[in-house]
């Protein structure tokens, strides 16, 4: 069984970020970059399939050379192979087309991705890859079981759990609760440094024109300093709070 995992390198959600010139993307040179957390769950699930069914796990990303850091993290966790796709892809659709072409070239029985990326939270690429491949897909999976050329997936829905049967090949996307990703071992880190990363170039002519354009990004406004009302009786404190909300905060 061949399992392909789609991963993306994103800015650390716990770190301060800067916008690149033109304010259309994050300044990735100054940002602290990590593997997208949902994609880590996808890698972990692929490794569990490998341990249970004897699969080969190949991790794939699209991006510049720096994105190979994310691939080496996945290799250190236990993935067998890695590939970096280069393509003039700028929106979810063109990214999905490029990744789908890479999946065809690599061959796969199952593709696993994170439900969304922590930087844009669009959650479109996994389903679009399935559409490009002509495969069924199950999104936001919280439990996955494979048996032969079929499987069962669960995902949370409002008020309950949805259970879906599927046949391979399939694309699934990982949701929080599917698993807890393992840490990379020291031997795994050392092996990952020596592994070759395959390069897959996708011609832009095969991707078509992007259908989504990011015109600008803005950082949230700085928070105003808070106020503490002290030394007042409850009635006076309540009156002063109402005045502040009305005259200064303009909320009421």
Image (spheres, grey):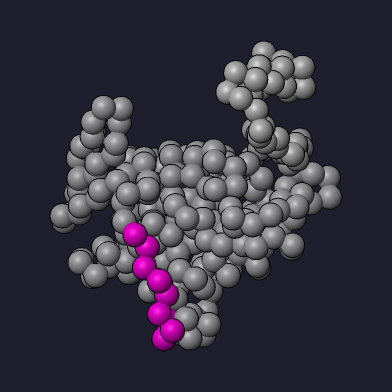
Q: Left or right: 158 with respect to 251?
A: left
Report the residue at 58% width, 53% height from top. 13
Q: Give percent across and percent down for residue 252.
A: 67, 13
Q: Left or right? Give the position of 230 relative to 195.
A: right
Residue 182, image quadrant: bottom left
Question: Quick one: which residue is furthest to the top in this view?
Answer: 252
Residue situated in front as seen by the camera: 34 or 88:
34
Q: Is residue 148 visible?
A: yes
Residue 230: percent from left, percent from top: 66, 34
Region in magenta = 180-188
Residue 202 pos. (x, y %)? 60, 56
Q: Could you tell me what secondary structure mostly forms the magenta stretch?
A: loop
Q: What is the total number of numbered labels drawn onto the structure image?
A: 0
The percent coordinates of residue 205 (x first, y second) are 66, 46
Quarter of the figure with residue 78 = bottom left
Magenta stretch encompasses residue 185: yes
Of all residues shown, which one is farthest toward the left? 147
The quarter holding residue 59 reads bottom left
Which of these two is toward me, 129 or 202? 129
């Amino acid at each position: 069984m061949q399992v392909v995992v789609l991963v993306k390198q994103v800015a650390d959600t716990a770190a301060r970020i800067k916008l690149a010139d033109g304010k259309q993307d994050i300044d990735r040179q100054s940002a602290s970059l990590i593997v997208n957390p949902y994609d880590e769950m996808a890698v972990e699930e692929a490794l569990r399939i490998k341990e249970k069914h004897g699969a080969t796990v190949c991790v794939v990303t699209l991006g510049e050379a720096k994105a190979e850091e994310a691939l080496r993290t996945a290799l250190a966790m236990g993935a067998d192979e890695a590939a970096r796709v280069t393509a003039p892809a700028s929106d979810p659709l063109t990214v999905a087309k490029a990744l789908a072409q890479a999946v065809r070239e690599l061959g796969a029985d199952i593709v696993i991705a994170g439900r969304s990326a922590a930087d844009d939270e669009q959650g479109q690429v996994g389903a679009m890859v399935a559409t490009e491949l002509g495969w069924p897909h199950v999104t936001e999976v919280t439990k996955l079981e494979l048996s032969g050329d079929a499987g069962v997936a669960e995902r949370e829905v409002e008020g309950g759990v949805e259970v879906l049967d599927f046949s391979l090949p399939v694309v699934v996307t990982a949701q929080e609760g599917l698993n807890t990703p393992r840490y990379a071992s020291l031997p795994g880190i050392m092996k990952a440094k020596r592994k070759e990363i395959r390069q897959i170039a996708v011609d832009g002519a095969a991707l078509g024109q992007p259908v989504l354009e990011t015109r600008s990004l803005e950082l949230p406004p700085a928070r105003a300093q808070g106020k503490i009302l002290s030394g007042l009786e409850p009635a006076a404190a309540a009156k002063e709070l109402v005045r502040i909300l009305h005259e200064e905060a303009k909320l009421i």
